[in-house]
Image: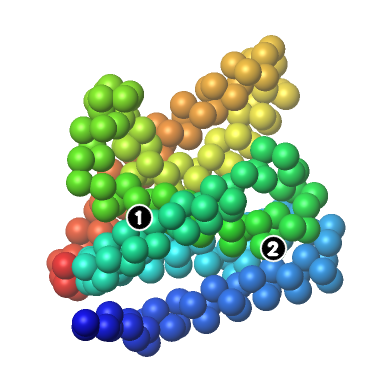
Amino acid sequence: MVKEKKYQFGGFEITILILFIVCILLRFTSNFYFPLEYVRNSTMTHLRIDSLLCGVLISYLYHFKFDLLKIYSIKYRYILAIMAFGGLIWTPFIDPVMSFFVKTIGFTLLYLSFGIILVVFLLKNNINYLLDKMFSSFIVDWISKIGFCSYSIYIIHTFVNTLIARGNIRFQIFHSIYLQFLITTILSILIGMFMTFKIEKYFLQLRNKYYPSRI
């Protein structure tokens, strides 16, 4: 019987894992010494970049070590499912702004859980067919576009919220917080899509011109 060959982490994976550890240690330090810095402890790059790096790691494994990713995902699928469920089950019950747990371990559990779910979607051969059948192709396509533009939407939404809020204070445009939420959401999505498909795409084309993709 041939023994399964154990995977040896390369320099890239080790670097990412070290940064994971550094980020969570920084979160503990910052939240312990500066507990009242609610916004900073939730948004500062050096405290949250591990979430982005998780996506980078998944992308690296998917494009360059796909077979390995698939083998381990199938082998440990039940353990991964339990981890994903356990890492998200607490989210409806804890206020993220005030919670020391959320802003330290909680952020780690979130990106690990959603990372596992992302891998499941990536490895499922007929995922598009299943989603279209369940929700309709129109809804799936629009949610996919919003997901594709999510970073631009995330970047611009605070500005949109602030602008609309200040305008509403001055001109009393909205008399319903629900209508204000709807308008700011729609504007954030539309502006985020413009940023992605026009501005970001332009600079990505420049990058690909001088530094072609290895994929």
Give coordinates of residue 198: x percent, y percent. 28, 44
Image quarter of residue 69:
bottom left
First-in-chain label (2 vs 1): 2
- Circles 2 and 1, Cβ within 8 Å, touching? The answer is no
Q: Is residue 47 above or below residue 176?
A: below
Residue 145 place in picture, x, y as percent: 32, 37
Q: Amino acid at mark 2?
A: Thr
Percent across and percent down for residue 50 are 52, 67
Q: In the drawing, what numbered circle is on residue 104?
A: 2
Q: Does residue 119 sit above or below 160 in this rendering?
A: below
User: Considering depth in this image, is 176 or 76 the residue closer to the camera?
Assistant: 76
Residue 83 lies, with reference to residue 164, above or below; the image says below
Residue at image x 73%, y 70%?
28
Q: Which residue is mark 1?
A: 119
Up/down of 78 relative to 61, above or below: above
Q: Position of residue 79 (x, y in %)?
A: 47, 59
Q: Is residue 86 left or right of residue 99?
A: left
Identify the element where label 2 is drawn: helix
The residue positioned 39% from the left and 32% from the top of the image is 190
